[in-house]
Image (cartoon, grey):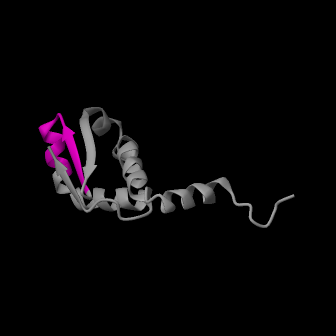
Amino acid sequence: MRKPNDMTLKDAITKMLSVYRLRGKFDETGVVAMWPEIMGTAIGNRTTQIYIAHRKLFVRIESSVIKNELLMVRTGIIQKLNERAGSEVINEIIFL
């Protein structure tokens, strides 16, 4: 039987992230982790470095051809990543 002040594990983790102000870093980590899943294996395998700083996603890609293609669809990638994260995590992508 549940007590009136019981909460689910999901609610408890969400509340903890809010209280300790870790929600932003948690969302950023999720975006970095889901990069290969969203972009596919071809791009994921050629990505050598990926990190977020000041709401900018920095991605180092080995192939200049793929980098050029991604530059053209940059806004679509930003929208897709933010939709998947559930909030606006990144504003800009910089390809290195």
The answer to whether 44 is drawn above or below residue 89 in the figure is above
Image position, residue 70 (x, y; %): 20, 49
Q: Is residue 21 left or right of residue 70?
A: right
**Which quadrant would the C terminus be assigned to in this image?**
top left
Tell me how many marks there are.
Answer: 0
Q: Is residue 30 left or right of residue 19?
A: left
- The residues colored magenta run 56-70
Residue lying furthest front: 20
Q: Residue at x 39, y 58 (%)?
A: 24
The answer to whether 23 is drawn above or below residue 48 in the figure is below
**Pick the front one: 9 or 16:** 16
Residue 39 lies in quadrant: top left
Q: Residue at x 13, y 47 (%)?
A: 68
Image position, residue 62 (x, y; %): 17, 34
Q: Residue at x 44, y 62 (%)?
A: 86
Q: Is residue 40 left or right of residue 3?
A: left
Image position, residue 15 (x, y; %): 56, 61
**Pick the front one: 62 or 96:** 96
Image position, residue 63 (x, y; %): 16, 35
Q: Residue at x 35, y 64 (%)?
A: 88
The answer to whether 73 is drawn above or below residue 39 in the figure is below
Residue lying furthest right: 1
Q: Magenta stretch: residue 67 in it?
A: yes
**Which quadrant would the N terminus be assigned to in this image?**
bottom right
Q: Magenta stretch: residue 89 in it?
A: no
